[in-house]
Amino acid sequence: GSATYFLGYELGKSMYTSDLVQKALQGTSLGSSAGIKGALCGVSAQCVANLMFTPIDITKERMQVQAALLASGRQTKLYTTRELVRKIVREEGIHVFMRGYWKGNMLWMPWSTIYISTYESLKDLELGGGGSSGSSTLELGFCAAAASTIACVLTHPIDVVKT
């Protein structure tokens, strides 16, 4: 899961530094903005990560409701994860595993965008714009913890509405 998130993060950084994006930002102050870079990376990270998280969540949720379905008579047995996945593919189609992909992205993109933008900005402030090379784990950990705290506080209302 986390590997796909950070793969998306790295893809976002590659997109940001691409000639196409840099040409579009040329002549603006946005070309050097850690916030803009972070926003692009956050969206990219979330979209890639949800390619893995969405099918896992669908499967997990279906596994969790099995006992209630069995008790109500709408299901005749408890399935293993493998059996359940095969049953879903056979009866509903493989596309079912991506249901909610965009909704999930819409719920998590704000957090991811704020987190990565803040992390990149704090890293630039803390390390003088020199990137993470030569920085201590403690400094990067502080940047990550502060960014996560800020992102959680700012997106908490979305979480409350969601649940």
Image (spheres, rainbow, N blue to C red):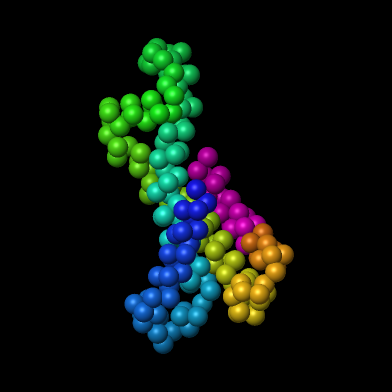
The answer to whether residue 44 is above or below residue 52 is: below
Q: Determine whether 26 is above or below 85 in the image.
A: below
Location of residue 77 in the rendering, given as x and y in whole percent from the top left corner: 41, 15
Which residues fall within the magenta stretch?
Answer: 146-163
Tally of numbered discs: 0
Residue drawn where x is 48% and y is 62% of the image? 9
Question: Is-magenta flag for residue 153?
Answer: yes
Residue occupying the point 29% across, 40% down: 95
Query: Percent position (x, y) of residue 109?
Result: 47, 56
Q: Is residue 116 above or below residue 31?
A: above
Q: Answer with left or right where residue 152 lies relative to residue 23.
A: right
User: Which of 108/129 is in front?
Assistant: 129
Task: Choose between 147 and 60: the one closer to the eye.
Answer: 60
Residue appearing at x 38%, y 16% in the figure: 75
| Residue 39 lies in the magenta-colored region | no
> Observer-nearest residue: 161 or 127?
127
Q: Position of residue 99 (x, y in %)?
A: 35, 41
In terms of image quadrants, where is residue 23? Answer: bottom left
Q: Is residue 109 visible?
A: no
Residue at position x 40%, y 80% from top? 22
Of all residues, the one furthest to the bottom in this rendering is 27
The answer to whether residue 38 is visible is yes
Q: Of helix, strand and loop, which mostly describes the magenta segment?
A: helix
Residue 113 location (% of width, % of height): 50, 61
- As drawn, is 16 to the left or to the right of 159? left
Quadrant of the image occupied by residue 18 = bottom left
